[in-house]
Image: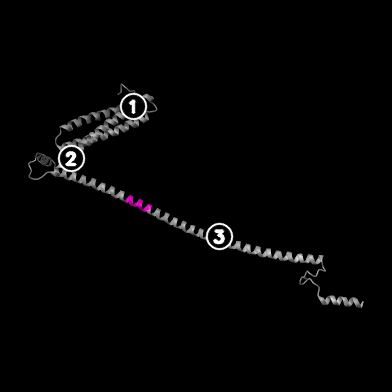
Amino acid sequence: MASDLPISPELEEIDGKIQDIFRALQNGFQKLDKIKDPNRQSKQLEELTGKMRECKRLIKEFDRELKDQENRNPPEVNKQLNEKKQTMIKELNSYVALRKTYQSSLGNKRVELFDMGAGTSDPVAEENVKMASDMSNQELIDAGRKQMDETDQAIERSKMVVEQTIEVGTQTAANLKGQTEQMGRIVNELDTIHFSIKKASQLVKEIGRQVATDKCIMLFLFLVVCGVIAVIIVKIVHPNNKDIPDIPGLAPPAGRKLLSLGAFGNL
């Protein structure tokens, strides 16, 4: 890589370590195929897993160093270095997938230890007996404890999910209750407004009837006044017309008229 790309000594050193780990992983998985003992296979997988963790750490360090030098490198060099990083990530992921495959196969073999039957001459059962004899009591206890710890962790996670679900449900119920109460208050206010509008309509109708009655009375009084005025005008214009009756209160008293004539005769 040093001859292909003008990289810094730091990146070159990290890349060299990563390539060494890749070669070790390749050789380790090749040896793993030749190991028949499940215990030795498990230990070999643990060693390979440690190398994968170290490789992951170095790739992250490579990425940090690459970002620090990004401004100092030409764009083409940065592009090639990023492609190199992606290649290393893909190669590491391939080893991770291979490790999972071996772990799954090894786990299935260990599960078969508990499925063997007593007093049988099945070759598979005999192989399981041999595998069980190769495992120590402490290893079996450790495996059982590990499984129990994983089960406890799964149960704790389930409890946390249930608690969160209950909390969310409680909050939702409280919100729904508040919204229901608010809707009830709105309905009551609408009923009050409807009742007020109904009462206002009745009051307007009653006021309208009173106004109509008052108008009729005022019209009648107006007609009476007009009639009185007309009679007065006619009496003034035709004072000797006997067909027009005197208006009460307007004709002079009879005694006062005679008294005036007697006084005039004495004179």
Q: CA distance from mark 2 to mark 3?
A: 86 Å
From the image, state whether disc 1 or disc 3 is nearer to you: 3
Asked whether, in this view, residue 214 is left or right of residue 163, the answer is right
Q: Position of residue 51 (x, y in %)?
A: 24, 34
The kind of residue tagged 3 is Ser
Q: Identify the residue at the far front of this view.
A: 243
Residue numbers of the magenta segment: 163-172
For disc 3, the marked residue is: 201
For disc 1, the marked residue is: 81
For disc 2, the marked residue is: 108
Look at the numbered disc 2 and give the secondary structure of its residue. Answer: helix
The magenta stretch spans residue 157: no
Residue at x 42% of width, y 54% of height: 179
Up the image or down, 62 lies above or below 250; here it is above
Check whether the beta carbons of the residues at disc 2 and disc 1 lie within 8 A of each other: no
The kind of residue tagged 2 is Asn
Q: Position of residue 138 (x, y in %)?
A: 16, 44
Up the image or down, 90 lies above or below 229; here it is above
Assign the magenta stretch its main secondary structure: helix
Q: 10 Å neighbourhood of mark 2: few (<14), some, or many (≥20)?
A: few
First-in-chain label (1 vs 3): 1
Q: Identify the residue at the far right of this view.
A: 267
Observer-nearest of 133 and 11: 133
Q: CA distance from mark 2 to mark 1?
A: 41 Å
The kind of residue tagged 1 is Leu
